[in-house]
Image (cartoon, rainbow, N blue to C red):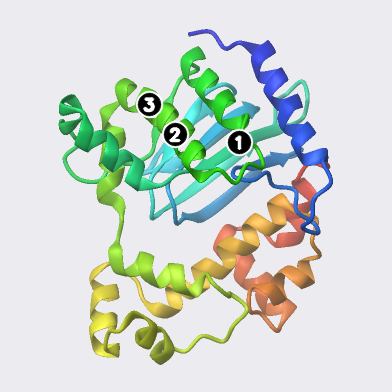
Amino acid sequence: MQVDVSRLSRMIARIDSFISKPSEIEDKDSVDPFGLIACMRGVHMKRVPFFEPCLILVLSGKKTVYERGSGIKVPAGSLLAVPAPIVLDLTNEPDASTNLYKALVIPFDLQLLEKIRNRDARSAVKANGASGVISYDFDPLVFTAVEHYLDLEGSDNRSLLSHRMMEILLILVEKNRNLLGFIFSSQQWSQRVRSILGEDLSKSWEFGELCSRLAVSETSLRRYLQSEGTGFREILSELRLTYALMQVMQTSAPITQIALDCGYQSLSRFTQNFHERFSLPPTKLREAMATR
């Protein structure tokens, strides 16, 4: 279906108006409960981790994600559903006429997909095992559902937010039932570890303290995490760098402060690790981001 450019423009203007509102949180450019990614230059990043499932609606420019050696192109007006946990290489390319890339990022709870599967007999037909990223072409019905969700910007009514998100997911499941396969992407122990470590990324976490919080022995937790292909240090490092990535892309906070907030006492070490992880240093990424 042909993209409705005017609707895209109106949504961009609407989101920009949200961001221009005074915020009680210093340096906060994201919009609760969703986020906006914007850049004026092409950006290619490697090994970007996603720790919670989300929908990415490209509003301007084009996104390409690389999975299993192939590139999935997501032009303006299209939507990408991303499972979690997953690590992806991706490219954000600005629109040739406006020199701007913009995308709306909407995280969602897997429990909503569980509800869809459990209450609809037809939804019992699910993907065999975990599903990868899923792209959706422009659809006015999906776009309208996203607009309804945007109506709740700044709202603390979690029940209503959940209903609006359910509206989006129901439409997407009807278009591609492989979305239900996201339910099988969750890794229980690693996710529990992430939820605890994410409480304070600046803290010097010790493995023994983590085990006490989870009421599990150190030997058992190491084994559980190893069975999921990860470990304590790997999870902590990924969490810190992922938080840093979002702060560099979505806020104007100084790089030095971001490093400290992520538990790095050395700016050079932070820059080195960031560069090694995402293939470009934080200063170069910040330079590419659009001024909003």
175 relative position to 101: left or right: left
Q: Earlier in the sequence, mark 2 or mark 3?
A: 2
Labels 1 and 2 touching (C-beta < 8 A): no
Residue at 72%, 77% (x, y): give it.
268
In the figure, 272 relative to 122: above or below?
below
117 relative position to 193: left or right: left
- Determine the image quadrant of residue 226: bottom left
Mark 1 to mark 2: distance in Å? 19 Å
Rate crowding at label 3 as few (under 14), some (14 to 19) or many (20 or more) other CA atoms within 10 Å. many
Q: Position of residue 108 (x, y in %)?
A: 45, 44
Residue at 25%, 49% (x, y): give it.
184
282 relative position to 234: left or right: right
Q: Amino acid at mark 3?
A: Leu
Q: Amino acid at mark 2?
A: His
**One can see residue 229 in this view:** no
Labels 1 and 3 touching (C-beta < 8 A): no
Q: Amino acid at mark 1?
A: Leu
Q: Nearer the viewer, mark 1 or mark 2?
A: 2
Residue at 49%, 48% (x, y): give it.
89
**One can see residue 79 in this view:** yes
Q: Which mark is residue 159?
A: none
Q: The C terminus is located in which quarter?
A: top right
Determine which residue is flagged by label 1. 104
In the figure, 161 relative to 206: above or below?
above
Q: Position of residue 204 (x, y in %)?
A: 57, 87
Q: Which mark is residue 172?
A: 3
Residue at 77%, 60% (x, y): give it.
283
Q: Which mark is residue 163?
A: 2
Mark 2 to mark 3: distance in Å? 14 Å
Mark 1 to mark 3: distance in Å? 16 Å
- Determine the image quadrant of residue 21: top right
Q: Earlier in the sequence, mark 1 or mark 2?
A: 1
